[in-house]
Amino acid sequence: MTDCPPLVFIVDDDQDIRTSLTRALEQRGFTVEAFESATAFLDAYDGSRSACLVLDYGMPDMNGLELQVELNSRNWPLAVVFITGHGGVPESVQAMKGGAVDFLEKPFRQSHLVERIEAALKIASSRRIATDTKEAVRARFARLTERETEIVEHVLANPAEASSKEIGGALGISPRTVDHHRARILEKTGVRSLVELVRLAATLRDDGPAPF
């Protein structure tokens, strides 16, 4: 079984640019899908595939920076390379702060674009792996019952008060009941101790205060 060719999306309202870039990138072994607008891209892409997005800055309706903000909010496994004919320093700074790999001004050398695309694909692949890992961890916590979730939330909020007696006192249940729930929690999340449980939950820390 062979690996799929690296995937590149092009979003540019200039048909000539879309055509020329598609042809050039396909000749270099990339799979290319081109779109005339940000809206068309959002309608077609579901976030399931890791890819590089070659994105024009100056488009009507939704420009490249606005699309970047939307993509970041969805946490999709994409790495963006901006191309522009009239972007300035403020725009490029904003794009890079948003996580763009580069901000290239037209005209640019195709070899330079290919180099940046290859870098972007590595970043996108890493993001895909990180996203998959978080989803797998979140699925473990999703198996917990309401009471088990309360115990985990107490441990995360009060790591210095994690004995069965302390947990039981806080939640109004007996230490023996806590022991029973704790064994089930460790089994369902696939860890051996509450310390490992806290470390596992920490992998989701960027997604919010709790992993549930």
Image (spheres, rainbow, N blue to C red):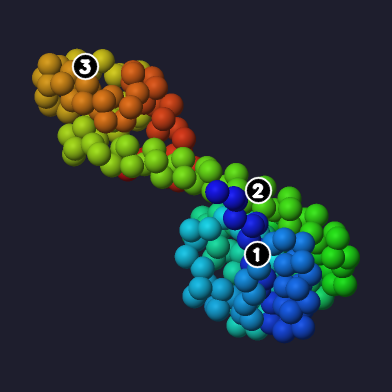
For disc 3, the marked residue is: 164
Image spot of residue 91 (x, y percent): 75, 66
- Which residue is rendered at x = 65% and y = 48% of the image? 123
Q: Is residue 92 left or right of residue 185?
A: right
Label of residue 31 in the image: 1
Q: Quadrant of residue 96?
A: bottom right
Q: Quadrant of the C terminus?
A: top left
Residue 123: mark: 2
The outermost residue toward the front is 1
Q: Which of the two residues, 8 or 176, is positioned nearer the viewer here?
A: 8
Q: Earlier in the sequence, mark 1 or mark 2?
A: 1
Q: Above or below — where is 78 with respect to 70?
A: above
Q: Within 10 angstroms of label 1, few (less than 14), some, or many (20 or more) residues? A: some
* Horizontal arrangement in the rendering, residue 44 relative to residue 30 (left or right): left
Tell me the element at label 2. Answer: helix
* Left or right of residue 102: residue 211: left
Q: Amino acid at mark 2?
A: Ile
